Amino acid sequence: MEQPERPGEPEGMAPPGTAPEPGPAEPETAAEPAAVEPETAAEPGAVEPETAAAPVRARRRGRTALLIAGAVVLGLVAGTCTGYLVQADREPTKLPPLSQPTLKQSKGEAPEPLSASQDRHVRTDGDLRKLLLKKPRGTKDVDLLSADDGWFDLASYAETFSDPKDAFAENVGREFRRAAIVGWRQGYTTVEIRLVQFRQEESMAASEAVEAAHYWADFDDNHSWSIPGTDDGMAYAYTKPETKAGYLPVYEAKAFAWRGDIEMEIFVSSTKPVGKKTLLGLAKRQMERL
């Protein structure tokens, strides 16, 4: 049954207790979608208005560092100026005199110089001829070129080499100082001993001369032995004699060693082979005198 409309009620209003009939919603009456409140719905990454803090401006630090550096520089300058002013007001310090007082010498006698047994230079700087072996009794003198007085000058010493010119120049380079020589003849055996001394201001010339002598003396046809009491002294006895027309065959033997600034040279020639005992005996006794 149709209900009569009540006066005063607007059209489209359903009476209380009845549901409105479904129907197309009119544009002017259609309800708009409910707006989402900020506190209930928020987009991802969005900051809530209540909790979002205001942006803070970054604090500058360069100004503070400049102030500290300036203060340090001012402090250094002030300290330097203060020290300079303090030092300028002081009286200059007197320097000690350059000359020193004369030292007092000890009283008493001076110590005695070392003996030849304690100082080798006392022995070798004296008469070099006194260090040579003495001639055995019953022996005869031999012709030793210009060394009749026992001394060999550089020219005479160079003449004993196969090439005197080169030997002279070589010994000048070695700082030749002097040489002493002694010799004797007993039967058909001749002995010659030389002591050659060098200045040795630039090199160990004595050891160099011995090393060169070893090079020229060591051959295949010889016997060789070390000289007792020396570092590199060697003795050589040749097994093949030298022959000359009208002369007997001659066997040769040599020995070389050094001590300090002196080179020892021994030459023995005989019509018979020179034995080890004879050659080493001469070399050992001569080195003992050095």
Image (spheres, rainbow, N blue to C red):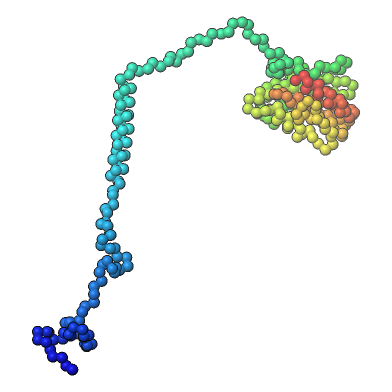
Out of 169 and 40, give the one closest to the viewer. 40
Q: In this view, does 23 lie to the left or right of 139?
A: left
What residue lies at 32% left-to-right and 67% top-to-bottom?
44
Q: At 22% from the left edge and 85% from the top edge, which residue is drawn?
A: 19
Q: Position of residue 202 (x, y in %)?
A: 63, 27
- Left or right: residue 5 compared with residue 53: left
Taking depth in this image into account, of 80 and 264 the one nearest to the observer is 80
Which residue occupies the extreme top position in the image? Answer: 108
Percent of width and height locating residue 107: 59, 6
Q: Can residue 16 be seen in this view?
A: yes
Image quadrant in which the N terminus is located: bottom left
Quarter of the view holding residue 271: top right
- Rendering quarter of residue 153: top right
215 shown above or below 99 = below
| Above/below status of 199 relative to 101 | below
Position in image of residue 186 (x %, y %): 88, 20
| 74 sits to left or right of 212 | left
Percent across and percent down for residue 16 are 18, 83
> Given the current orientation, which residue lies at the most extreme bottom position?
1
Taking depth in this image into account, of 27 and 45 the one nearest to the observer is 27
Please tell me which residue is depicted at 13% across the width and 86% down the height of the picture: 11
Residue at (63% x, 25% y) in the render: 201
Against 188, is 16 above or below? Answer: below
The reply to whether residue 126 is visible in this rendering is no
Q: In which quarter of the image is residue 110?
A: top right
Check the picture and name the quadrant holding the C terminus.
top right
User: How many numbered tags mark residues here?
Assistant: 0
